[in-house]
Image: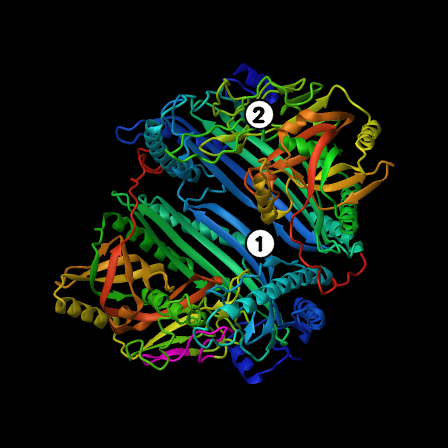
Amino acid sequence: MRGAILLLVEARVAALLLASLVAPRLSAGGSEPLLLKILAEELERNFSILSQKADPAPYFISCAITDTQYELISASRGVLQARSGRRTRLLDVSVRVGSPELDNYHPVDGQTPLVTSARPLPIEDEPDAIRRVIWLEIDRAWRAAAERLIQIRTRKQVLVAPEQLPADFSREEPVRWAEEAPPLDFPAESWAARLRRLSREFAAFPELVSSQVSVVAQREMKYLATSEGTRLAHGRRLTRLEIAARAKADDGMDLANSETFEALDASAVADDDRIRRAILRLGEELTRMRQAPVIEPYVGPAILSGPAAGVFFHEIFGHRIEGHRQRLTTEGQTFAKSIGTKVLPEFLSVVFDPTQRRAADTDLMGFYLFDDEGVRARRLTVVENGIMKAFLMSRSPVPGFANSNGHGRRQPGREVVARQSNLIVESARQVPEAELRRLLIEEIRRQGRPYGYYFERATGGYTLTERRTIQAWKVIPLVVWRVYADGRPDELVRGADMVGTPLASFAKIVATGDRPGVFNGYCGAESGSVPVSAVSPALLVSELEIQKQPASEERPPILPAPWQPGAR
Amino acid sequence: MRAACLLLGLWAAGAAPAPESRPDPVLAALEAELERSRGIRLAELEPPYFIQYTLEDVSGYSVTATLGALIREDRPRFRVAGVEVRVGSYEFDNTNYALADLFGRAPAALGVPIEDDEPALRAYFWLATDAAYKGALESMARKRAAVKHLGVFKATPDFWKAEPVTLLEPVSDRGPEATGWPERVRELSSLFRDYPQIDFSQVDYGANRTVSYLVNSEGARIRYVDWVHWLQLRAEAQAPDGMPVRDVRTLVWPQSEDAPAPAEFREATLEVARMADALRRAPQAENYVGPVLVEGIAAPQLLAQLLGRNLAVVRRPVGEPGRTPPVEPSEFEGRLGTRVLPEWMDVVDDPTQTEWRGRRLLGFYRVDMEGVAPKPLVLIERGILRAFLLTRQPVEGQTGSNGRARLPGPFGARSAAISNLFVSASTTLSPAALRERLLEMVRARSKPYGLIIRKLDFPASGGLRELRRLALGASGRASGGRLVSRPLLVWRLRPDGSEELVRGLEFRNLSARLLRDIVAASDESHLFEYLANTAPLSLAGAGGYVAGTSVIAPSLLFEELELERSEEQFPRPPVVPAPPLAARR
């Protein structure tokens, strides 16, 4: 009986990975899932005929299926606002013609092709119906590939080669791994009742203009077959609950506050008590924020909480070490030539570990066993004691890095590029949070300023990495406190954004806290939206710039809310 | 008021409120919040003179299959709420201004409750009204400034008054259900197994129920229920030279009891399979100028486009100085009282007709999107253009809405559209005689053949990409051709009476002007029904609002139409042969 691991190539590693799975569903009888079998057979049939008859012949074909089932429920003040659910199977085909050294995916003027289209496949395992669609997509992808290779070869002759370019595709060991699809296991009716109940808690805050509690539960199975022999079926579940509310200050500024709770298993999402407490805190913060002072532009010391620091690292560092950015001539290439050099303070290390399931009592969204090119996920140290060690790699090589390290990711319908997974910041200069605060006050005094800032929660951020724009980043905080040096209590403020440029920002990190915090979210880039996590202790920075958030000039509602006394 | 009520029959209640079997929390919420919003006013600025709330409650079921396997199954359930606030006066307000749509949208984060909870619904309309009112003020200020800069400003009023209608239809608890449809689409899609040369085939079934609510500050109070069901059959293949060919058929019916018999579904599916397979083998057509018989459903399909879009007058909004808003005018503009069809043809739009030859019509409705009750309307009488389809958006030379607001429109207005369009001819020929007439014309002109068009690709089924290519082709033509559907099924009719299917033709320079040159019509009428939407050529699956439409027309013989070979670049035929299909089970 072979169980979950059906066709083991690397028994040792696979067994290790298995241990990190919570409850793998064993496939009965040890046979390959039918869908994977259909996929592999049709791929082989096409590859074999195209190899003999097509000109140019493909040297590589991959077919990926993303089978997703989701349920979404959203409620506001005790009443459902949305309820939907769907099951889809989407096919992404990649055909490579030419050779790994130069193929149709070769970037031209910083552009790589988009051929795949996430074509819908039958959601039932009916071989003929599925084969037809796979055949049509391979045909389309091959024609596009052949056309682009001709263009590239023609262009090659007229362009100067700026630098010795790496190959277009890396060689990797094929993998074989199959597990059965986990059931979604999401009792929608009881969740709807739960959301109605929880969303009513916001009614305690009459000054909010809107509020929601929503949940999305999804089950995702990924199937991959390649002409190299990879046969992969793996999946996971993820449930995400979000509480969110909005208010408006009297000067028109829109105020938003939100918090999310994730769990790979729907039944493990935070309990009612914890969510209720979070709702009450959110509501109170928003209500206070309406009266809070608006920040003035500022440069000075600040503490970023763990989750806020996670977003900070994701934006300023994570995106700049994505492999393809070291290669494309349109990119800023901040760290392209930094391997072996100091890029961060020596007490900091940064690790990407997609195989880590949990940190700080939270399931990590950036968890996976294989990336979207079928490369096994692994723990990867990118910065060790401040020294740059590696880039995040897909199968698109860059100078000095000929192979993937399992970070080729995409959303269905996009082409794979290197993306982040679970970013984990490790610190050798950890101090207890109370001590970190003391250090902040000391730093404020040292700089002769009246106050510094504490960024408690952030909702996300973005960064620009291309040359034609500025190398800058921005983190959008939700809850920000002014910390006074003279012992006054902290003061809630509103309207602040954190901004900066990457290289200048790193040098200002002074110390870290001793407890990791988690930020779970979706990251959007060239290859679409992918789930990621960032784990970091709180950071003390000696200099951080904050700027005013864009503000609305629209006044608060003219009529009182219908639920306000005297509204009727 | 009286006229509207008469038409509404059972459900009309005039000034007295209609009897209600139970309180409706949706209507109660809309009315309560509307009442409260009458008092909205920002500082010294003008208060609204008109407020209208709409809410559409949509529940649906849809299922798609290919070769016996489901591709997707959906149960959409959502509500769309609309708030219209007008400031100024009926004479001059914030609409009919090029930038009007940019202001006053409800905040994106605001969700519409999908449960019948009065406080929750009121909370939505409270904030949406606030945004709409502030947007109206902004739009009004800018419009006033823009008008100041205009040299000539034609003072057509901005909004027509309408009699408030009260119409409260009962709503049952049951929305669309699956009831055997997954099995049926699996079975129908399996029929394509007998056609291995068809590369891709798909069967889509869907049903939607929309409960629409409308209340306004003039006193309208409306709740009505719309049902629509459809089955789309689609087959795609590639000719040996690489040209993609397809046949598509969509059957549409209003209520579930109006559904065609199972045998009809089966026959329709097989017909689509046969035609796609025949097209694959058919010769490629050549450019053609000459007599054309538009036969069967192709006639109403053609008229739906040529008459449909030209019978509504498009009003040009006040623009920003130096910028002309993109508006495609009706070809019939300024032609009231002139001949647009042969003098032996008449056209009536009649949304009050419930059925035709025992079949329930899709274009029937009691009130339009603005809450106006429609009446039958003679549009073209003995070939002379007599009237336009009108909404509450005033157009020059007209006096009021005739209840044809059927789709959302730009610049704060709705678009007028046809409903049940009856095209009739007083001088007719039998179908056989009509065909003989075409043959005579072919012989008289010593042409090798004439053309018979039996189906157009309307609503467009080729997706956005094909639509863009067609639009580009149409606008590129020197004579200013307009976007018109591709013919899907075209036959050559040789002088000896034999017919041959051809593929790959497109219309060239087809405009409403050619309708005057119709030579003859058949004594048989054909019904074509479809779901109109706001996309060009009512692009199938474009989403958004749909308006069920029925067009009834005889076959038509044209003196001269131009068709040309498609300029599309064909993909190469696949190198790998299609995977084999197991026999149908």
- SS for dot 1: strand
Dot 2: element = loop
State which quadrant residue A94 falls in: bottom right
Determine crowd level at label 2: few under 14, some 14-19, many 20+ residues with C-alpha closer than 10 A: many
Q: Amino acid at mark 2?
A: Phe
Tell me the chain of label 1. A
Residue B555 on the magenta segment: no
Would you say residue A454 is visible in this rendering? yes
Residue B256 spot, x, y in % from top left: 68, 37
What is the CA distance from the residue labelled 1 to the residue labelled 2? 46 Å
Could you tell me which residue is drawn at 59 percent across and 56 percent down?
A87
Query: What amino acid is found at the position of numbered circle 1 in the picture?
Result: Arg
From the viewer's perspective, is the residue at label 1 or at label 2 nearer?
Answer: 2
Pointer 1 residue: A86
Q: Residue at x 34, y 65 (%)?
A: A307
Which residue is painted at 62% across and 66% down in the image? Answer: A146
Q: Residues within 10 Å of mark 1 (few under 14, many from 20)?
A: some
Asked if the stretch drawn in magenta spans residue A399, the answer is yes
Q: Quadrant of residue B177?
A: top right
Residue range corresponding to the magenta coloring: A381-401
Q: Residue at x 51, y 58 (%)?
A: A217
Considering every residue shown, the one lying at the far right of the view is: B496
- Front-most of residues B49 and B281: B281
The relative height of residue A236 versus residue A426 in the rendered view (above or below) is: above
State the residue position of label 2.
B332
Q: Chain of mark 2?
A: B
Question: In the drawing, does residue B1 fall left or right of residue B304?
Answer: left
**Residue B564's x, y, as percent?**
69, 42
Q: Residue furthest top?
A: B2
Which mark identifies residue B574?
Answer: none
